[in-house]
Image (cartoon, rainbow, N blue to C red):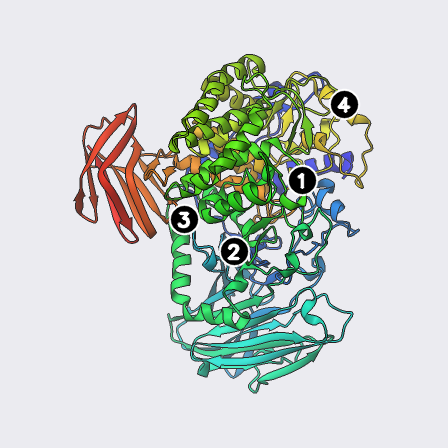
Amino acid sequence: MDNSSRRNFIKTLAFGTGALSLPIIPLLPGCVRVSKKGHLIPVDKQLSAEWMKSLTERGQAEIYTSKRDELKYIGMPVGGICTGQLYISGDGKLWLWDIFQSNYEREGPAEEKKWRLDQFSMGGLYQKPRTSSKENNRFQVESGFAIRYKNGGQEKYYPLNKKGFDNISFRGEYPLAKISYKQDELPFTVKLKAYSPFIPLNVKESGIPATVMSYQISNEGKEDINLDVGGWLENKVCPQVADVDFRRTNKVFKSKNKTTIFMTAAGAGLSARKGFGNMAISLIGDAANHKATARLDSDDYESGVFAENGAAKADFKVSQAAIGGISISLNLLPGESKTLTFLVSWYFPYYNEHPTDGSQMGAIEGLDKMKRYYANFYSDANDVASFLANDFDRLSNTTLQWNRTWYDSTLPYWLLDRSFISMDCLASQTSHLFDNGRFWGWEGVDCCPGTCTHVWQYAQGMARIFPSIERDLRSRVDYGISYDKGLIHYRGENGKAYAVDGQLGTIIRVFREHKMTTDNNFLAEIWPRVKQSMQYIIDQDENKDGLLEGKQPHTLDAAWFGPMGWISGMYLAALKACEQMAIELNDKEFALTCTSILNKGPKNFVEKLFNGEYFIHLAPDYNSINTNEGCHIDQVLGQSFAHQVNLPEVLPQKETKKALESLWKYNFAPDAGRYAEEHTIIKGERVYAMPGESGLLMTTWPYGGDEKAVPGMAERPNDKEHWIGPGGYFDECMNGFEYQVASHMVWENMLTEGLSIMKAVHERYNGAKRNPYDEVECSSHYARSMAAYGIFIAVCGFEYHGPKGVLGFSPKISPDNFKAPFVTAESWGSFTQKMLNGNQVAEIELLYGKLELNEFSVDQLKGFITSKVAVFIDGNSVRATLHKVCSKCTVVFDEKTILKSGQQMTVTLT
């Protein structure tokens, strides 16, 4: 988009419907902070009263509708974690069938199918989002569901999508999609719940290669109605194999609790080809009531699926559409509802035919012999469907219970949505789990391999929802495969290189993983290597003053020199984490090593790097790209990460908060797209905030100096064929970085600023203009986006230390009337706090697993003086003592207290 096009787009936003969604009025000249180069960042953000109110109010669940033309970009993953990628569209179609192989080079909307052009140029899929229409997808799997309505001797067919219904609404609550269908002329309505079983802490049963399509059909009329409901699926095994002759086969299998059309393929050498395996469509229930056919001869599948006489088996040539279907007849009385559940299951376990160069997944030794993790538990797609059908009530009920638990909260709907949406990275082709239990991730789908430490360290979500995966990553990869005498290779086998930020973040993550288990075993086993990796970095601090000054490679794809707030702050946070871990393991000598540097580091950090407003980068020269006097988004990242693991203060609180205030003042742009356009010194090509959209910019220079930070950048060629490196990042809004700042602000009680940054991202991903369920940075479903969960942790003031049996909360939003979910090492449930009859009452309702506690803490509510405590579990008194330090009230149990699923603990402070 050239400058004139951009300006026209801005005018469209200003005077068209786009302006309605903007929380900020146009920039006011009197509010603009102008540097020597005329950078436009308003000091007064002009937040409206309505906007401010929406940040913390419960509000309404966001629903996208066909009436407002908001469904075309919807693509929510609805498969199991690490089982491939399958979307559901806003009107209920399944699309983007990326389940067949582990490495699928994604097509994009660019005219030329060049991967780097698509992903990097102008933000790729952010600027030109993919839609579910056939012309925007390289290949399709024909599938769908329809209703045949018999009325007055006539039959009409209504596919369950926008073709059949003109009033469709979509509510996404990952992992659950809720879609409703209405048509004025019809006496019935349909509600769909689409999902794959998702149970926090349970990796196996959250990784089932299947999608549940559960339709509730309700008779809204005054007379009985007769309906038939059917579903069909195309056998697409080996979808891209065209150079050999083979056949596809569909077979109908019936059992006491389901009917399945099992889909396979056979041919010479086919088993070694991409996408080899099998797939199935099933209908749960009494098979005696089901009609099934292995072959749908008609191209009109919406009616053909209801054919009376179906084949039990059918063979197809490669050129033929190998489609089978299942249907059932229903009679509904007035006011009656019935639910039908279809399953789409698959089994494509092989990791073969991959690139073998060191930059791709093929660099992993033995990959050609590995399978997906789910291959350990199922033999084929029919086996998957049988497992689901046989244990459907438990799997479905637990998934739906988690969904209810997450949303049964006083927190705003938008915040709950955005905090958890990025967890769908795990159900995309970003994330892979091998049959030997090893997790492996791209940064984003098919982009930048090796579970990169300096990207994945930002992701807080997986560690809290599936902590066993993160523990295995630390042990098997970071301190196993990737480890070399104190150095952690930041991409594992995919690149023998060092990233100082990734290594420091990994050390902090070890402490997080330790706290998200129940004993010291994990930490004790890994500690010698963790200590060595910390010492590796200490050795680079030659004068042991707490500041790193040498070569510092990092996530902005460069190596900077000289002390900076960003890396040295992380260094201090990692030292503090190591000090605490050493104390817990009684390693007094190494604890003292860390403490000695920590005694000097924070003071030096302020004296040398703080300019009175924010922390800068003391670059030794200006011959390479760096931030120098700029206000950089990650300048106090160390303290942000420290909050996530409840470390004591790492960076001086006064200056740290001032730095956050400066980030808000200088980097939060009501029109981030306009800033990127007019800041001519930076020539980046990626756009993650369009003109008219708000966001927190990576780096700004309030007092100039950007021409020194990016030497020669203005003279570099500005063509879309080249991705211009780290200097091009500075004008970007990248939501993973924005989330970490937002969470830090919430921890520091800058609630308005932190939530505004988060909601700016949320509004950039409004379904009317792009896919809300695909957060883009470099590629789709970018792992750094899972930093969003850290904001949820901060809002709850969540504190947990499993080995010590410590659980605590310090809510930041309406603490006197608060309810939110929580997840610990072995359990999940709800925490509630309120004032009741003049007492402060906190409740823990455990809904899954078990919870062992020695201590439980809450903050004393404002204006309330606590002197006594009473604790009950299911009405039975528990002996405990109250300890107070300032406003923090800690209940210490006389003996270990164990809560089991279904139990409730009530703590009353009087």
Coordinates of residue 480 in the picture (x, y in percent): 56, 44
The quadrant in which the C terminus is found is top left
What mark, if any, has residue 496 been given in the picture? 1
Which SS class for mark 3?
A: helix
Query: Which callout, 3 or 1, points at the residue further toward the start of the chain?
Result: 3
Q: Quickly name the residue at label 4.
A: 711
Q: Quickly name the residue at label 3.
A: 406
Q: Are marks 2 and 3 in contact (CB under 8 Å)?
A: no
Of circles 2 and 3, the one toward us is 3
The quadrant in which the N terminus is found is top right
Coordinates of residue 583 in the picture (x, y in percent): 39, 29
Work out whether 294 lies above or below 624: below
Say whether residue 611 is visible.
Answer: no
Which SS class for mark 2?
A: strand
How far is disc 3 from disc 1 in space, using C-alphas? 40 Å
Q: Residues within 10 Å of mark 2 (few under 14, many from 20)?
A: many
How far is disc 2 from disc 3 in space, using C-alphas? 18 Å
Q: Residue at x 53, y 70 (%)?
A: 379
